[in-house]
Amino acid sequence: MSQSTPEPLPEPIEDDGNEYDGLEELLAGIPELIRRLGETEESVAALVEELANYPAGGPWLWEGLEPGAQRALWIELDAFVTWLQNRILSHHASKDGWIAPCWYQHPDAVEQLTALMVAHKASYHPKSKKPSHALVDWFHRGLWPTMDSLKLRQTFKQCLQKREHEEPYAPGMNLVASDEDFTAFVDATVSEAPAAAGSKTPGSVTDAPETGLPPWMVDPGTGEIIEPPQGDEPPEPEEEYARHG
């Protein structure tokens, strides 16, 4: 038996240095990447802190804002209302749909106009450049319903007619939060002790212990599940309970 001739070994590849081309450039860029990563971490930390300290309800909840934030919101809202009246509403022949110059003295109008401004910001100032129906929605779901609401409630009617601020003829009824009657009602309605596990409200249908179904769905004699009658509407639980109970 003849021995096979071993295959010749491959010739060594000459190292011309091309294998490491660009490596030094990549290594030189690492410090810059580390610096940018550090800046990103600082930005994220600052953003998290800002969100954590943000007032409840966002920067448009008047009651939750600090004086400086309230002043900034007043200035922003004033610019929006001025733009809205001059750009859109003043071109309507009927002044019933206008905004009175004393709008800021009407708390209900301030709240509605603030909401309208926020909706406008969401529609006109997104980062996305993709066309959408957001602008049309702002007009037909935001602007016109808001103005119709102010007109229906005659918020600015007297002020526009007299061209000066006019207080309502009779102030509305103001509620007092947590008054004595309300507190007594809550104390009488809400139990301080937690309800026992498995307890039911008086008058409620108790589930069958073995099936977990209401009793009217289980035959008391055989324990079989009662098939509901064929039809468009399911039977009323009280009727089935009376029929099988």
Image: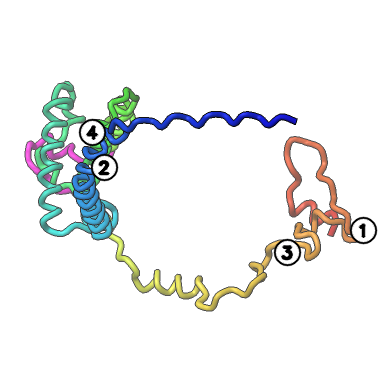
Q: Is residue 27 positioned above or below 87 on the image?
A: below
Name the chief secondary structure element in magenta: loop
Label 3 with label 4: CB-CB less than 8 Å = no
Report the residue marked by disc 2: 115
The residue segment tinted magenta is 152-171
Please tell me which residue lies in front, 198 or 240. 198
Q: CA distance from mark 2 to mark 1?
A: 61 Å
Residue 147 pos. (x, y %): 25, 33
In which quadrant of the rendered image does the N terminus lie? Answer: top right
Asked which secondary structure carries label 1, the reply is loop
Report the residue marked by disc 1: 222
Residue 206 numbered mark, or none:
3
Residue 216 pos. (x, y %): 80, 56
Please tell me which residue lies in front, 77 or 20. 20
Residue 55: image quadrant is bottom left
Q: Which amino acid type is shown beneath numbered disc 1? A: Thr
